[in-house]
Image (spheres, rainbow, N blue to C red):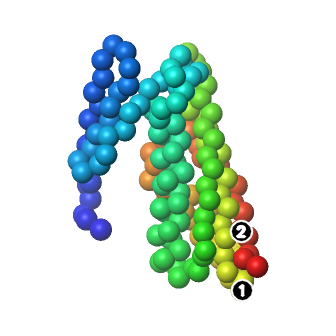
Amino acid sequence: MQDFPHLYTVTAAGGPDGDAILEGAALPPIASAPPAEFGGPGDRWSPEMLLVAAVADCFILSFRAVAKATKLPWDGLECAVSGTLDRVEKVTQFTGFEVRATLRVPRGTDEAKARAAMERAERICLVTNSLKAQAHLDAIVEVSA
């Protein structure tokens, strides 16, 4: 890992109508538009969906790092995140994120250790640590047959 601070730069370009195009160095462009709830087409990634996706992605990548550091065996992790957008004191903002994560582990794995690793991943996720809204983890550990 590189020393801190890290700098991440994204450019966005768009006109009065149509998609905004998001680009980052060495990354494929992403077309973005407002979600259907804000009058957009609803068939493109929106800032709202990208933020919720970042929470899910960060949880999985944080868990991967924790599992590696603790030598926890695991077979797979699925993470579904719901973000609630609301108006608070006349300001539109995310007020919460529900993270439902299901971890599959091999038979014989210490389930308490697996759950602790998931809880640690939630605590160290840099995306949720950077947000005003609180994230809540619903952790499920499944033992493979």
Horizontal and vertical percent position of residue 117: 59, 70
31 left or right, relative to 45: left
Query: Which residue lies most toward the bottom here?
Result: 108
User: Which image quarter: residue 145?
Assistant: bottom right
When asked about the image quadrant of residue 90, the answer is top right
Residue depicted at x 65% and y 58%: 101
Q: Are marks 1 and 2 in contact (CB under 8 Å)?
A: no
User: For the point 44% across and 26% down, which residue is it?
Assistant: 33
Residue 141 numbered tag: 2
Classify mark 1: helix, strand or loop: loop
Residue type at mark 1 is Gly
**In the shown orientation, is residue 54 left or right of residue 1?**
right
Q: Percent from the top left, x then y, of residue 72?
A: 57, 79
Residue with the mark numbered 1: 108
Instruction: Kindly identify which numbered label has been placed on residue 34.
Output: none
Compared to 11, does 87 lie above or below? above
Q: Is residue 129 visible?
A: no
Question: Measuring 71% from the left and 86% from the top, which residue is drawn there?
Answer: 108
Task: Judge left or right: residue 115 versus residue 35.
Answer: right
130 versus 36 height, above or below:
below
